[in-house]
Image: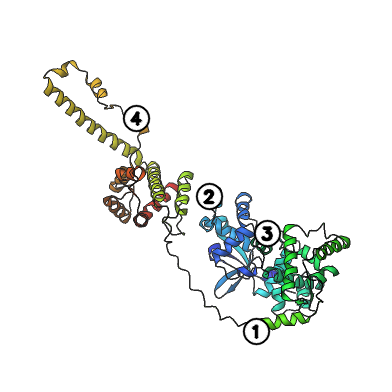
């Protein structure tokens, strides 16, 4: 008996934990996924997004620690891939593809202490084999973790069986009887045949969705004598594989009918609940005349199939995948790994919308949204740091000086017309008549983007990093389309004036460190 109590517990940073490619929750078609692709798969198929919301709203339960093993210097998650994935997307919501889900998570995170899940206490197993015993007990016994569906459990046992472990050995380790293990091996071999069929897209997708496709109903069909005869196979007594007793075309035709009926409801627990229902179902199939009843089932057809397989040329070994480099997409304004969180919902919504746009096909939309984002973020930064009031006072002083110049010019022109005309005119009324406002409401004054950035660049206190300040000053000197008010108006109103995608990307690269600095200041 394995003594689990001596296995060490260790707190491991979530970001360093590797999700396991051999996780039974992954189907055979997903075994070569990257780490981020595994997370995508678990979000879509294993309710990881819902689990993440549960962690934020209900807390992270400590009673089910992930089981890990150290291989090649890295910790791999053998058990707890859902919980680790949920923690990963909470720490970095950018891992979530769906903008709606990502936005929802970010809103919830405002009241959640991430330090709770940044490091998780894990059970370190000495090897995979010993860990499997505990894992199977968790997912098939009375543990609180989510149970495996039939196909995931079947695959787990099948993989151990083809690796050389006997039914007796597995039964002695796991809380599963020998007959249950044999049924699992048979069921998984049938499922493999169903998943290889050339099915309509919708049916194929449903069959491959292991969490909803009912292998129990398929099992009801082939466990009935008439059903097994119709489907045209028997099970090998040694390895539980299928021995096909029909020509390939007829076998696939009949199995396709079974797959379609399971997906579309032609086969269900009510129709195949008893022998009478099963007998009626298969009698009705024969009566359709779609299937060749003149064929006598014979194992020779299996030999033909095996011979056909042997004739197939061996495919060349796959070349190892080249490492994926984190480079900027040519279709997006910024790299997919870019993440700016201001804590201001409206600004963050604009950021994620801006990040999702295709800059090649939507350069004008990107330009307008980028300009709005830069404007709002600069305004909130000045407001948070106290620079907005100073800027408004400067702006009012500047406006007053300009107004005085205008008014003096009006007075000069009037004097030239009539020497004593000003003696009979009230200066206040004269200012109103020429549109000069003597009492500017400071609260309603919103400085222009260029004026805000110029103020930040010239301030000695708002940005203390010299390199950031120099980058901002260089950006202002360039007078890009995003800064100039006249150019921006042309972009919005003039049908002949367009944004340039490459220029926008250069501007983003140049201005990003400053935007990141603004966002950091807002969250302090």
Residue 240, horizontal then vertical, whole percent? 77, 76
Quote the CA–CA distance across marks 2 and 1. Answer: 53 Å
Dot label at residue 12: none
Residue 85, horizontal then vertical, whole percent? 59, 61
Are the two marked residues, 4 and 1, in contact with CB atoms closer than 8 angstroms?
A: no
Decide which of tag 2 and tag 3 comes sooner along the chain. Answer: 3
Dot label at residue 441: 4
- At horizontal 54% and vertical 52% (from top left) the residue drawn is 102
Q: Which residue is mark 1?
A: 311
Q: Nearer the viewer, residue 327 or 123?
A: 327
Q: Nearer the viewer, residue 88 or 504?
A: 504
Q: Residue furthest top?
A: 424
Are the two marked residues, 4 and 2, in contact with CB atoms closer than 8 angstroms?
A: no
Quote the CA–CA distance across marks 4 and 2. Answer: 37 Å
Q: Is residue 186 above or below residue 333?
A: below
Q: Which residue is mark 3?
A: 63
* Number of callouts: 4
Are the two marked residues, 3 and 4, in contact with CB atoms closer than 8 angstroms?
A: no
């Amino acid at each position: 008996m394995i003594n689990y109590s001596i296995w060490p517990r260790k707190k491991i940073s979530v970001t360093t934990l590797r999700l396991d490619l051999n996780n039974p929750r992954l189907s055979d078609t997903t075994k070569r996924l990257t780490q981020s692709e595994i997370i995508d798969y678990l979000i879509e198929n294993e309710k990881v997004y819902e689990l993440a919301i549960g962690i934020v709203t209900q807390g992270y339960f400590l009673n089910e620690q992930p089981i890990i093993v150290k291989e090649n210097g890295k910790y791999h998650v053998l058990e707890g891939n859902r919980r680790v994935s949920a923690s990963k997307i909470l720490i970095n919501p950018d891992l979530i593809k769906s903008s709606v889900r990502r936005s929802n998570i970010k809103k919830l995170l405002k009241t959640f202490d991430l330090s709770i899940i940044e490091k998780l206490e894990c059970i370190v197993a000495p090897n995979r084999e010993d860990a499997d015993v505990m894992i199977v007990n968790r997912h098939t016994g009375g543990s609180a973790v989510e149970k495996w569906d039939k196909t995931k459990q079947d695959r787990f046992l099948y993989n151990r069986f083809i690796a050389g472990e006997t039914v007796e050995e597995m039964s002695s380790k796991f809380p599963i009887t020998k007959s249950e293990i044999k049924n699992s091996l048979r069921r998984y071999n049938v499922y493999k045949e169903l998943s290889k069929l050339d099915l309509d897209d919708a049916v194929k997708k449903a069959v491959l969705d292991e969490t909803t496709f009912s292998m129990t109903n398929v099992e009801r069909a082939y466990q009935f004598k008439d059903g097994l005869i119709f489907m045209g196979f028997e099970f090998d007594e040694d390895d539980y594989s299928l021995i096909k007793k029909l020509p390939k075309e007829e076998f696939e035709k009949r199995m396709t009918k079974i797959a379609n009926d399971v997906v579309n409801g032609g086969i269900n627990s009510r129709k195949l609940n008893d022998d009478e229902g099963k007998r009626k179902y298969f009698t009705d199939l024969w009566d359709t005349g779609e299937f060749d009843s003149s064929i006598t089932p014979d194992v020779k057809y299996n030999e033909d199939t095996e011979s056909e397989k042997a004739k197939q040329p061996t495919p060349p070994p796959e070349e190892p995948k080249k490492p994926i480099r984190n480079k900027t997409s040519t279709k997006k304004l910024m790299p997919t790994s870019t993440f700016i969180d201001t804590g201001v919902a409206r600004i963050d919504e604009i950021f994620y919308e801006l990040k999702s746009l295709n800059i090649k096909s939507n350069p004008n939309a990107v330009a307008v949204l980028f300009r709005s984002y830069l404007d709002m973020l600069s305004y909130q930064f000045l407001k948070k740091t106290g620079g907005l009031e100073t800027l408004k006072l400067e702006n009012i002083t500047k406006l007053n000086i300009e107004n005085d110049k205008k008014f003096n010019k009006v007075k000069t022109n009037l004097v030239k017309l009539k020497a004593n005309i000003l003696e009979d005119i009230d200066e206040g009324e004269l200012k109103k008549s020429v549109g000069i406002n003597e009492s500017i409401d400071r609260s309603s004054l919103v400085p222009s983007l260029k004026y805000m950035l110029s103020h930040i660049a010239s301030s000695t206190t708002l940005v203390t990093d010299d390199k950031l300040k120099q980058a901002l000053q260089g950006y202002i000197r360039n007078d890009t389309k995003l800064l100039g008010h006249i150019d921006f108006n042309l972009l919005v109103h003039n049908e002949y004036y367009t944004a340039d995608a490459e220029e926008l990307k250069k501007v983003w690269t140049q201005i990003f460190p400053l935007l990141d600095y603004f966002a950091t200041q807002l969250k302090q």
